[in-house]
Image (spheres, grey):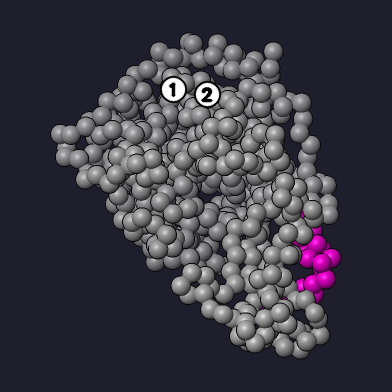
Amino acid sequence: MHRNLLILISLLMFGTTLLQAQTAPLEAARSYTEENAHAILQDYMELLRIPNVASDLPNINRNADALMDAFEKRGVIMELLTLPDYPDAPPVIFGELKTPGASRTLNIYVHYDGQPVDPGNWTHDPWEPVLYSGPIDRGGQPIPFPAADQPIDPDWRIYGRSASDDKAPFPALLAALDALQQSESTLTSNLKFFFDGEEEIGSPHIPYYLERYKDKLAGDLWLIFDGPRHQSGRPQVVFGVRGVTGMEVTVYGPHRPLHSGHYGGWSPVPGQMLADLLASMKNETGEILIEGFNDETEPITQADREAFATLPDVDDEIRDDLGLSWTEFEGRALIESYMYPTLTVRGLQSGNVGELARNVIPTRATASLGVRLAKGNEPEVMLDKVEAHIRSQGYHIVHEEPGLDTKREHSKVAKVTRSTGYPAMRTSIDNPMSKRVAQAIDDATEDDLILYPTMGGTLPLYHFEQTLDAPIIIVPIANHDNNQHAPDENIRIGNIWYGIEIYTAMFTME
């Protein structure tokens, strides 16, 4: 019998005696949601109207003020954590809700910043949330917000930046606390809240926050409220994440733009040079050609493969949904790809296209490269390997803008600008606290819970694991087709309702 199946059976046996105790809080959560759905969504749309790019500190502070106020109204003792040595770092919002007699503390992580936006690529203003009858790409249409006496369809969507990543937990958390307080249901754990304002830029200040406020952040389990549910729509608990790093690479041609008629076929063309360099890094099947790129990656174990076997096979469905006729490493399952490092060209720039295209040879071409890390990969070591590969292609590497003398001295020059990053992490599926949370969620949902070894995305969990020495699990609520990080990001309303229910279940578990 598969190991994960045995764990699920033990969870079910353990949970049978607890099911009745959890029924009342769940019923209270569902009743509260039904009676207050319009207000929950209206308040949420107000939060979405506040821009939340980490570099926009005035608006980040507006978000922090709004969240502080909302949680204080629910009786949570709130505090804005800052770093004296880094006055421009986005603040961490800390909150604490003590429960008399509770013997454990659950620490809840959410990030309140979002990805930058290019409004020209959005259907609507990304900071003006719009209600839709369904997904835009499947015929959904904008609809007016319903009157208080009109029903709300759980399949409706709210479109706006951070609607799913990662403001979605906030309306669910607030509603869960309201429901429990109004029904006089009892929390069974102390709760601590940690809201990060710079996750989308790699949380560079989080290690300093964790070290400075280590005693304040002590707890028995970290619950990371981020990410999407499984592509099958089933609920899941995730036990690990990839790490992340990256770089920008700029290659150079002539010192000034040249007329392509006068100099084409003679002057080096940066766009072509960059295309050749990128093609040398990865072939058309997805194999990364950089020497030693996989050397430190921890191998997939038999236990990992047994866990894979319990997961729904939705790869063909995802390919169909995305309009893909092929995928890299044909035959490799999506979940298996999460166990390897990746190299992604996430952006290219050289000259202009469309109506702005000109008959010139540009002076430079730039690629933004993203590197996702598997267990065993160290960020700086992986970037060293990429730089070594660039040198092997004949490039002289600089880390500042090169001058004319440098360009004249070397036939090929590449400027490399490294990103910050952090390694992957993973918590054991056998951890007792993790099993208890998984049981609470399983009891609260109709569909079978998926225990997912690791997710493809990245969170700064490595720092929490290293500094605070507590188990960490991820409890996602967003719909898998939420367009996170992309234009037209959205949240399915039913997924917010789901969040209210499972948060209530976790906060009242025995």
Front position in the image: 335 or 171: 335
Residue 394 forms part of the magenta stretch: yes
Point 71% across, 79% down: residue = 265
Residue 194 forms part of the magenta stretch: no
Please report contact status of discs 1 and 2: CB closer than 8 Å, yes or no.
Answer: yes
Q: Quadrant of residue 429?
A: top right
The N terminus sits in image quarter: top right
Q: Quadrant of residue 395?
A: bottom right
According to the picture, the residue beneath numbered tag 1 turns out to be 445
Which label is found at residue 449? Answer: 2
Which label is found at residue 177? Answer: none
Q: Position of residue 322 (x, y in %)?
A: 52, 42
Which structural element holds mark 1? loop
Front position in the image: 395 or 117: 395
Point 40% across, 19% down: residue = 22
Q: Position of residue 442 (x, y in %)?
A: 49, 21
The mark tally for this picture is 2
| Relative to 505, residue 355 above or below | below
Three-letter amino acid code at the position of disc 2: Leu
Q: Is residue 25 left or right of residue 399?
A: left
Label 1: few (<14), some (14–19) or many (≥20) C-alpha neighbours in 10 Å: some
Front position in the image: 79 or 1: 1
Point 44% across, 54% down: residue = 487
Is residue 199 visible in this depiction of the protein?
Answer: yes
Front position in the image: 302 or 276: 276
The residue segment tinted magenta is 382-401
Q: Position of residue 468 (x, y in %)?
A: 62, 44
Three-letter amino acid code at the position of disc 1: Thr
Which structural element holds mark 2? loop
| Relative to 25, residue 493 above or below | below
Q: Position of residue 323 (x, y in %)?
A: 52, 42
